[in-house]
Image: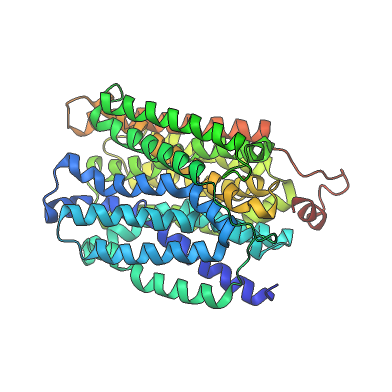
Amino acid sequence: MLDARRRWVAFYVLCLGTLMVVLDSTIVNVALPSIRESLGFSQASLAWVVNGYMLTFGGCLLLGGRLGDLYGQRRIFVVGITGFTIASVGCGLSQTQAMLVGFRALQGIGGAFATAVGFAVVVTLFPAPAERAKAMGITGFVASGGGAVGVVLGGVLTDLLNWHWIFLVNVPIGIIVVALMLRLVDESVPSDGSRRLDLAGAVTVTGALMLAVDAVVNADQVGWASARTTVSLGIAVVLFTAFLVIETRTAVPLVRLSLFRSRNLSAANIIGVLWAAAMFAWFFLSALYLQLVLHYSPLQVGLAFLPADLVMMAFSVSWSAKLVTRYGYRAPMAGGLLLAAAGLVLFARAPVGGNFWLDVLPNMLLLGLGAGVAFNPVLLAAMSDVAPEESGIASGAVNTSFMMGGALGLAVLASVAAARTGHHSDAASLLSGYHLSFAIGAACAAIAALIGWWRIREPEVTDDELYDGTSLASALG
């Protein structure tokens, strides 16, 4: 077991690597106009700069989680960060459309492997409940706040340097993370030495997820009723059905299906889908509102997200763990999700001539506060009933839920906004579409809050222990 100081240093290195991966899901969006002009993308082909990454990232999360359980979580994390860093070099040096999209797809694979085992490494590093709660709070900020930080950093790098640096900035960070992880974190592998991979299960579920992501992220452009969308979704359903059959018959399954009988894990996965949809409504729609309606520059858009990032960081790092220790999972989770829903409701009434102090800042603060409070209990609840030898696949499942929820949420909300706007391009028409999508995002957050309050199981403590932080922290473990 590592000493306390070394554990925390290792944890912060893990967070740095995870943040680097999370940033790439949003940092590109602010730079897309510059990338389009530089490499000559059409509007349709430009989507693949984002979709190529999401496709492989979403498809490989479960596989990465299982590989972590079989071959060691540190090993898979390092492999993922190494691959992500090498692919970042390729993206940053890209001079053609095919080169950029290809390296983005490789980034997605590396990012998926590193992200899939992230929560599991935290559980391994911090077996003590109080430390684990604090670490999960910081992890929650990285997972939720990283997207908003990506908007800030993307605006700064694109405005002050050029779009190539949104990728090249990953290179020194990746090298440092790999070197320190190998030095600080000991490897752990199954005690029985079993390393058999369910290859058929891995192929079918990875194929199903990739096809599902492809259908969802492209539905906004080709249409939900198009042949491409329906065929992709149909094949995804067939492959996923085959995966379920395989998992019930193989001796060593990729995913033990009974794992999802865990009430907290299954509820957290549903909450993750809804919450990610709401978060993507925030990241992308509010950025569009600021750029296309209020005419903010990329740098101004990034700075507009900064107050939310600071509030989210303060609560994730400090107060969220204390709230969980004091009140358990359900109250902070539901309360945080409802605060985020309120922030999206405020965006759903933002005017064309909006004022930053009245129509942007309060909304951002509510969303930052809600995310900072809610993520820690969601992650703790998800991992609370999972055996150590299955923490990797559980971590991969939670990350898959967040990713699929984000992809589906973004596709649906973008389609809804476009349908409401029609062929009009004036600010009022655009804002009408954004308003409807913000309202749907708020509904997703509110429904997630209700599910969390209804389905999440609290630790079993007595009434006398309820207000004793130490006792409750022990129960949370």
Of the pair 314 and 208, the residue shown nearer to us: 208
Image quadrant in which the N terminus is located:
bottom right
* Left or right of residue 325, residue 398 in this image: left
* Left or right of residue 431, residue 208 in this image: right
Q: How is the image coloured?
A: rainbow
Where is 473 relative to 292, above or below?
Answer: below
**Residue found at x 44% / y 37%:** 344
Of the pair 346 and 413, the residue shown nearer to us: 413
Image quadrant in which the C terminus is located:
bottom right
Q: Is residue 365 visible?
A: no
Of the pair 6 and 470, the residue shown nearer to us: 6
**Residue found at x 49% / y 53%:** 64
Quadrant of residue 427 in the image? Answer: top left
* Left or right of residue 127, residue 180 in this image: left
Where is 62 relative to 82, above or below?
Answer: above
Q: Position of residue 49 (x, y in %)?
A: 25, 49
**Residue found at x 47% / y 48%:** 61
Quadrant of residue 151 in the image? Answer: bottom left
Q: Is residue 184 visible?
A: yes
Where is 335 relative to 183, above or below?
Answer: above
**Residue found at x 68% / y 48%:** 386
Q: Position of residue 190 (x, y in %)?
A: 66, 60
Q: Position of residue 29 (x, y in %)?
A: 28, 50
Q: Residue furthest top?
A: 225
Where is 419 relative to 288, above or below?
Answer: above
